Image (spheres, helix red, strand yellow):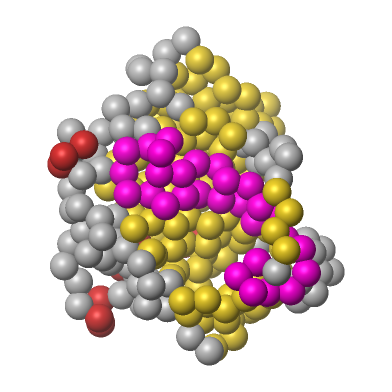
Amino acid sequence: MTDRLVVTTLDAPSEVYEMHGGERVARWKCLVRRNNLFGPWEAVECSSLPPGAASGVHLHSRTEQFDYVVSGSGVMTIDGVDHPVAAGDLITTCLGTRHGIRNTGAEDLVWLVVEVSGPGMAEGVPERDADGVRAGVIDLREARDVDALDHLAGPLRRARLVRLDPAQRESLVSDEQEHVLFALSGSGIAETGSTTVPLRHGVSVGVPHLGAVTIEGGPDGLEFFVVSLAVAVSTGGAR
């Protein structure tokens, strides 16, 4: 294995006032961004809103996005329609969509933002017509594994929830795709070459092109969210 990893925790987040023209103060941490990886990522971020706060409605004019709700509950407004969302929900945002989110619960609303270059801006993006993409909400705790091209037209390929029992292993190899995982619960380790990364809630691991990592569940098991994105031919990978 090659020691290629980008490891981030939720320590020392930034405070964002009136996020996207919204209300009150959000907390925000960038986990990986395009200069850490090789594919057409914009960024993978973790955002948090206190009860009653909102991230304002805004237009996605050049990027597509997955949002995954880590904890709490709220309402995601998508093209003028309100959708209740809670922990375990995956929200798909295709190019040209307007969306915003409000915390309607009694605890902080925490979610991951996976933003990538949209159609026409990323090499290797397949041709899709308007009927082939949509914005909506998916219960990922039920689905467990989502094909991104069923919902988006850009370079994202897959979103999964993975549960590992104690000592159970899963490998992520970044040849045709790059991967970013976020530990949700339990404990474990990520191993590559001579590097071992302890995993707990809030630890993120990016696996750049030509890297590889093996994830192992700890004594209480491990659950993590992972997204995969196609690497362009010019990077040395495949579409």
Q: Quadrant of the N terminus?
A: top left
Camera-nearest residue between 163 and 35: 35
Q: Is residue 36 magenta?
A: yes
Camera-nearest residue between 220 and 80: 80
125 in relation to 82, above or below: above
Give the side of residue 214 with respect to residue 150, left or right: right
149 in relation to 133, above or below: above
Q: Is residue 35 magenta?
A: yes
100 in relation to 159, above or below: below
Q: Residue at x 42, y 13 (%)?
A: 193
Q: Residue at x 50, y 68 (%)?
A: 91
Residue 223 seen from this side = no
Give the side of residue 35 with respect to residue 55, left or right: left
Number of marks present in the image shown: 0
Residue 32 seen from this side = yes
98 in relation to 123, above or below: below
Give the side of residue 230 with respect to residue 186, left or right: left
Q: Position of residue 47 (x, y in %)?
A: 65, 56
Q: Position of residue 86 (x, y in %)?
A: 66, 68
Q: Position of residue 72 (x, y in %)?
A: 73, 63
Q: Residue furthest top?
A: 194
Q: Position of residue 139 (x, y in %)?
A: 53, 67
Q: Residue furthest bottom?
A: 80
Q: Residue at x 32, y 38 (%)?
A: 38
- Looking at the rendering, the stretch of residues picked out in magenta corresponds to 19-48
